[in-house]
Image (cartoon, helix red, strand yellow):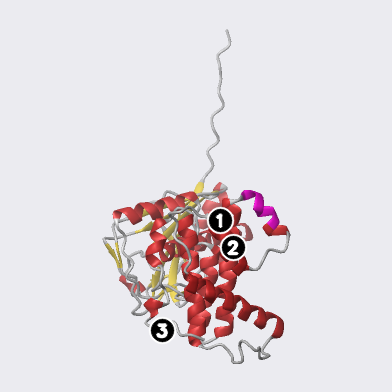
Amino acid sequence: MRESTSEEPVVRPTVKFRIRVGLEGPTTFGLSMSSVQVTLPGPPETLVTLHGEHVDLGPASLGHPVVEAVATYVVDAGQIDELAKVRSSEVDGVVGYWTVGDYTPAVRDLCHAALDDLRSAVLRLIELVRWRLSPDTWSGDNIKGDGSNILCWSADRSTWVTLGNTTEFKLELAPSAAELSEKTQQQLSEMAASGEREPLGREIWHAGVAAHNRRDYRTAIILGVSAVEIELKKFIGERVPQAHWLLDNLTAPPVYKMVRDYLPELLTETEERLSDAARGILFDAVERRNTFVHAGEKAHKKFPRAPESGESLKVLGMASDMLWLFDSYRGQPWALQNLGWADRQSLAWLNF
């Protein structure tokens, strides 16, 4: 009688890369919270962790991780041996570590791939926090450069070796009053685990706010209208899947006509509607955008002057409200709390 045999599973070495992101200067990120761990799907599995009872995203010299991301890779044993090479020389009493450029091409490619994944993980988590918790204080281009980071690797997730200055990825956040509750902590975890991202229309809207802040009002209006168009077509495709192909392949009706005549047909009686005033702003904004695109800087009988701050603000405020409404239609009731962005800027919705 033959004895049954089973092949031993092949166990390949793994290496884990970690990036810790901190800031230089007085910028703070006022996020009161307990430790949060969010697993992001996809190869490689990425773990994003925020640490501390109160995270103060202040001077990086404080020495504690502020935002941490970890990515795991399967590698050859020789690559771990190469990564384990640490310079023993000292310059002015400081031990020098190997950087990405010191390794063979294969290991350099591995490190660069890890950096790309970790950058994406950190920014994605921050964008989710912005979307869910801090849409006002992080609006525009307040997630940007001028910070610092440290890349490390480990074969066992307990002993970490610094690779040195390995990437130009920088991060800066405007001061924020975002605060995690037990409920929002769970929501953020579920969003990240499901693969959800800040909607594309909202990202474009932030670019529009950045344009408004630098007084580029024409660009702000174009981006505000584009954000509405993108999320409107996306929502119609979700509510009426049969219409998705038509929206993608045929010329769609003007966006203000779809909002006025078609969108109400898709909503239930209890779902919030866009106000008549906001629809009027949308109508004018689409005309204004079309004038910019087709006539350039030439004067138009309805718009004899270049756009000013008040007009840009109204368009961005209308667009923001529409995007929050679309979020609420998709099952995010908290989005309705964010309506009225322009009013919260302490600026009037001026007539133009």
Place of residue 327 in the rendered image (x, y in percent of width and height, measured from the top left): 47, 59
How far is mark 2 from mark 1, CA to CA?
8 Å
Say which of marks 1 and 3 sits in front: 1
Place of residue 183 in the rendered image (x, y in percent of width and height, measured from the top left): 32, 53
Say which of marks 2 and 3 sits in front: 2
User: Which segment is the magenta one?
Assistant: 241-246
Q: Please give the residue where the numbered disc 1 appears in the rendered image.
A: 265
327 magenta-colored: no
In terms of secondary structure, what is the magenta stretch mainly? helix
264 over 343 or under it: above or below: above
Of 328 and 109, the residue lying toward us: 328
Q: Is residue 103 visible?
A: no
Q: Residues within 10 Å of mark 2 (few under 14, many from 20)?
A: few
Place of residue 145 in the rendered image (x, y in percent of width and height, measured from the top left): 48, 76
Q: What amino acid is found at the position of numbered circle 3 in the picture?
A: Ala
Mark number displayed over residue 348: 3
- Residue for point 31% across, 60% down: 180
Q: Please give the residue where the numbered disc 2 appears in the rendered image.
A: 261
| Of callouts 1 and 3, the N-terminal one | 1
Q: What amino acid is found at the position of numbered circle 2 in the picture?
A: Asp
- Residue for point 50% across, 52% down: 195
Of 191 and 163, the residue lying toward us: 191
Residue with the most extreme left position: 53
Determine whether the residue tagged by mark 1 lies in a helix, strand or loop: helix
- Residue for point 62% across, 49% down: 241
Residue with the most extreme top position: 1
